[in-house]
Image (spheres, helix red, strand yellow):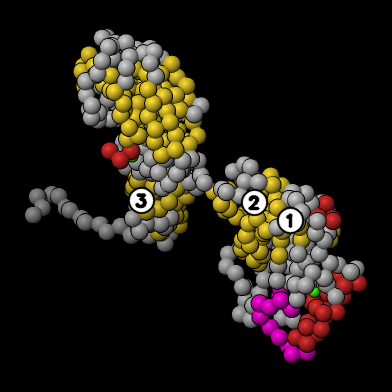
Amino acid sequence: MVAAGWSAAITCFLNTDPPVAAFTASSTTPAINSTITLTDQSVNIPTSWNWTITPNTFTYVGGTSATSQNPQVQFTAMGLYSVTLVATNANGSNTLVKTDYVNVIPYTYCIPTFTTGTSSGDYITLVQLGTIDNATGASASPYYNYYSSMSTDILPGTAYTMSVSPGTYSSGNYIAVWIDYNQNGTFETTEMLGTVNAPPTPAVSTISFTVPSGATTGITRMRVREVWNVSTIDPCTSYTYGETEDYNVNIMSLDKNLNLTLYLEGLFNGTGMNKAQNEAGDQFSGTIADQIQVELHNSVAPYTLAGGPFTLNVNTDGTGSLTLPAALGSTYYIVLKHRSSIETWNGTPVSFGGATMSYNFSTSASQAYGDNQKLMSGKYVIYSGDSNEDGIVDSGDMISVDNDVKDFVTGYITTDINGDGLVDSGDMIILDNNSALFIAKITP
Ligand SMILES: [Ca+2]
Ligand SMILES: [Ca+2]
Ligand SMILES: [Ca+2]
Ligand SMILES: [Ca+2]
């Protein structure tokens, strides 16, 4: 009903505007490895969304992705993250950048309390484990200290003994220790290293423990708790007398990383490597150019095989990475073997004592043993042409390549020296050149 003298109208607007991007986060200070939801609040009815988050230490979870309207994001490293949303409809797009929008923080561990605390001599005077060696007195309320700058390295599957000492009270000085092995922010019962009923300082007691082989690698929390007259201590509960001290421990990876850079002559295109072909196209997916076998050989005669062969995916930019067992901790020659290239040893033996090893064959001829590399466009590359892998480029290789040329053989095969998927004169050129140079493997 409309009153006399008035009229009413209902108008339908046709949406002719592009979106105005807007969004919020369920939390902008999430704990590491927890999940937040980014909620689209763009106006003018966007029909597609594109999210960008930097740095890239995160994953989309819950079946969401960078193109979801409301993605769920789990952050795997601490620090500041910038979030960008591009919202699009039929009329256009709009971009909103929120720089340093999310601050991913460490887990918030429970902070245990005491009603009386340290005043009667119930506290911790010593914690020793590896490089942690912390002598302290009695703290004030809340009788809790996180010594966040103190950390020690520990290895999965390895046994350790730590030393602890309580305060001055004459008896009932129970000390329990936990490590958050699975890094979930909670000290589970299974993560208790042990409990000791310790005589008063300066006496030192010990707790022996073995780090579980499945412990999550990285920095995590260790909690030491002294409680008077409680033999079964909880890591969070409030007690009457005592003190708590937290530390960091760094659970080391048992693996080593070997990062290699190398170029294969046949695939080399002047800047990087072409992707090896088969009849149907690329033999390998993504950025992988080709695969080679990597062996580690002892550095002294008779240079026996110490590790491998490991299959290495070599990318078009010449790089490739291997994860090796930590037991390979000595000094080795790195040996490269490829289906149609000359077996190549690295220049001088390399120490694998550290956690990460990097070696670049391409920077000089001498990066290969016997300077056995070819200079092409400023890079030293591995000689190709040994299609029968007998250690020399000669008539033996030419005969089989020649036969395959006549038969128009195609595929991912050893006679395809330049890796283009067919055997033809392009392969013969490389063979001719390298056999004329008497190219052969050179080993110590
Ligand atoms: Ca203390
Ligand atoms: Ca835990
Ligand atoms: Ca040969
Ligand atoms: Ca070819």
Q: Is mark 3 within 8 Å of ligand 2?
A: no
Q: Give the distance between the C-alpha atoms of the residues marked 1 and 2, in whole angstroms.
A: 22 Å
Q: Is residue 324 above or below residue 399?
A: above
Q: Quadrant of residue 435?
A: bottom right
Q: What are the residue bounds of the magenta stretch? A: 406-420
Instruction: Identify the main secondary structure in magenta.
Output: loop
Q: Quadrant of residue 88?
A: bottom left
| Quadrant of the frame with the N terminus | bottom left
Observer-side mark, 1 or 3, equals 1
Q: Which residue is mark 3?
A: 72
Mark 1 in CB contact with mark 3 (< 8 angstroms): no
In the rendering, which numbered label is found on residue 259?
Answer: 2
Q: At label 2, which amino acid type do we have?
A: Asn
Q: At label 3, which amino acid type do we have?
A: Gln
Observer-side mark, 1 or 2, equals 1
The numbered mark, 2 or 3, whose residue comes first in the sequence reads 3
In the rendering, which numbered label is found on residue 106?
Answer: none
- Is residue 35 at least partly visible in the picture? yes
In percent of the image, x 45 and y 44: which residue is there?
A: 157
In percent of the image, x 26 and y 9: which residue is there?
A: 120
Q: Quadrant of residue 295?
A: bottom right
Q: Give the distance between the C-alpha atoms of the residues marked 2 and 3, in whole angstroms.
A: 33 Å
Measured from the top left, where is residue 163 in percent x and y? Answer: 41, 24
Q: Is mark 2 within 8 Å of ligand 4?
A: no
